[in-house]
Image (tube, helix red, strand yellow):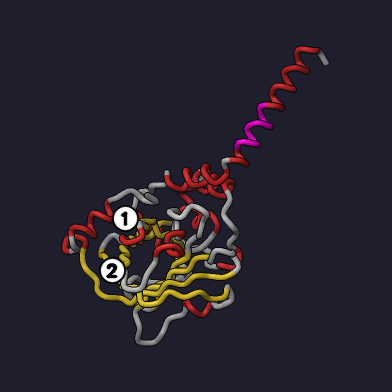
């Protein structure tokens, strides 16, 4: 091996080592930035198309979120089946809602926990990641969610208003919280607690459904803002 080639290989190796080290040091910042840049197109046509697609609802296979998963999700955005949006104004959540809870979907969005859920009916259940950054994905639920606050969903046809009435820590095995409750129309939001072993459940009661054009101007404005802000 020539001296020139040897020096070149050493330089390449050192460069890769530096880049890998930087990626490890700035793992959280890189991950947060990639999530924040996700801004999919969501409209009635997209929702109608994605609603008919199959999805994975096995929450037990969800892994903790690392930057490699976020990167894979960002390079595979078309695999995320966006079927709506969630806005929680008091704690600055505005996220796309993806069908299912596979790792790619939850890397960038909130995910539906059951097949054939309908906004404003039964128990509409969503899961989302709790990250170190208090403002990303479902992290604000842990730090800022309070009883009495309003949450809004949209399927791009109507807007559905809910009011939070329960904030409760549960076991990871308490999967029954996503089941429908006879005679009740509720919203259930689930994320990890600060240990990652347990879960935080936010539950809200359905208040009303309204068309986009008849919704309060402030609510319409919330839905017009960028995702993951």
Foreground of the two, 29 or 7: 29
Q: Residue at x 31, y 69 (%)?
A: 149
Pointer 1 residue: 45
Residue 183, given in percent of the width and then of the height, sits at: 35, 87
- How many numbered dots are placed on residues in this image? 2
Q: Residue at x 37, y 70 (%)?
A: 146
Q: Residue at x 28, y 55 (%)?
A: 223
Mark seen at residue 160: 2
Q: Is residue 228 magenta?
A: no
Which residues are drawn in magenta? 15-22
Q: Is residue 20 magenta?
A: yes
- Left or right of residue 39, residue 218 in this image: left
Q: Earlier in the sequence, mark 1 or mark 2?
A: 1
Secondary structure at badge 2 equals strand
Spatial CA span between label 1 and label 2: 19 Å
Q: Residue at x 46, y 79 (%)?
A: 179
Residue 208, given in percent of the width and then of the height, sits at: 24, 74
Dot 1 surroundings within 10 Å: few (below 14), some, or many (20 or more)?
A: few
- In the rendered image, the residue lying farthest to the right is 1
């Amino acid at each position: 091996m020539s001296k020139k080639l040897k020096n070149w290989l050493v330089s390449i190796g050192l460069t890769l080592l530096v880049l890998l080290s930087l990626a490890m040091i700035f793992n959280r910042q890189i991950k947060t930035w990639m999530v924040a840049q996700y801004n999919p197109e969501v409209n009635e046509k997209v929702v109608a198309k994605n609603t008919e697609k199959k999805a994975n609802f096995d929450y037990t296979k969800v892994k903790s979120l690392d930057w490699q998963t976020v990167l894979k999700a960002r390079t595979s955005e078309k695999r995320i089946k966006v079927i709506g949006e969630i806005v929680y104004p008091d704690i600055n959540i505005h996220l796309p809602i993806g069908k299912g809870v596979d790792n790619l979907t939850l890397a960038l969005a909130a995910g539906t926990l059951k097949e054939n859920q309908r906004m404003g009916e039964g128990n509409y259940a969503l899961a989302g990641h709790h990250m170190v950054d208090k403002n990303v994905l479902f992290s604000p639920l842990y730090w800022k969610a309070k009883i009495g606050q309003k949450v809004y969903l949209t399927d791009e046809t109507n807007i559905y208003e809910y009011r939070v009435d329960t904030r409760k820590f549960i076991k990871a095995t308490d999967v029954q919280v996503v089941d429908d409750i006879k005679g009740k129309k509720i919203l259930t939001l689930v994320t990890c607690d600060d240990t990652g072993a347990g879960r935080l459940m936010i539950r809200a009661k359905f208040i009303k459904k309204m068309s986009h054009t008849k919704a309060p101007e402030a609510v319409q404005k919330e839905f017009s803002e960028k995702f993951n802000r």
